[in-house]
Image (cartoon, helix red, strand yellow):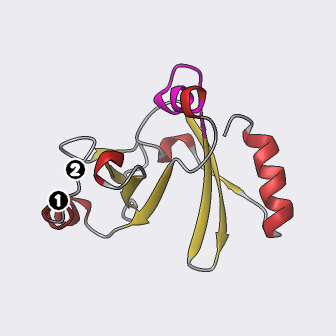
Amino acid sequence: MKDLDAAAKKYSEVLGVEPKPFNPDEFALPGLRGITFSMGDVAITLVTGDPGTPTAKFLESRGEGVFLLSLEVTDVEEDMKEIAKKGVEFVVDKPMTSKAGGKVNWGHPRSMHGVQWEFYQPPKS
């Protein structure tokens, strides 16, 4: 989102749900800020990036819209093996780990019809 605060206000009004901010340590890449709206088993997350980050560059070149589809997994390394057998290419060879301990990798948009998929393993509690 170009203006995360304005988007948060709009989404909150439309969905009737207050957003929960992400701790920056939950992101594997530095310079990201985000909020999430939880509705049962579904969550909508809005993210913005500091100037110069890949997310900010994406927004500059492509504009706002769907950046990625995020799926929560239990074992990202094992799931990557299975998903790769189905023709998904990954952005990085090995999952990245956030400061909070979550692991993540992304299915490249060219292998998913233009949509980047995120495979996220939350930190162990």
What residue sits 78% from the left and 68% below the top? Answer: 15
Q: Are marks 2 and 1 in contact (CB under 8 Å)?
A: yes
Q: From the top left corner, tell me how far across and down residue 91 is, in percent.
A: 28, 42
Farthest residue, direction bottom = 40
What residue sits 58% from the left and 46% below the top? Answer: 23
Q: From the top left corner, tell me how far across and down residue 110 is, in percent.
A: 31, 46
Please give the residue where the numbered disc 1 appears in the rendered image.
84
What residue sits 77% from the left and 50% below the top? Answer: 8
Drawn side of residue 28 relative to residue 32, left or right = left
Q: How many marks?
A: 2
Secondary structure beneath label 2 = loop
Q: Residues within 10 Å of mark 1 (few under 14, many from 20)?
A: few
In the image, what residue type sits under mark 1?
Answer: Ala
What residue sits 81% from the left and 43% below the top? Answer: 6
The range drawn in magenta is 48-59
Q: Is residue 100 magenta?
A: no
Which of the labelled discs sits on residue 89, or is there none?
Answer: 2
In the image, what residue type sits under mark 2?
Answer: Glu
Q: From the top left corner, tell me how far across and down residue 95 is, in percent.
A: 26, 48
Q: Quadrant of residue 119?
A: bottom left
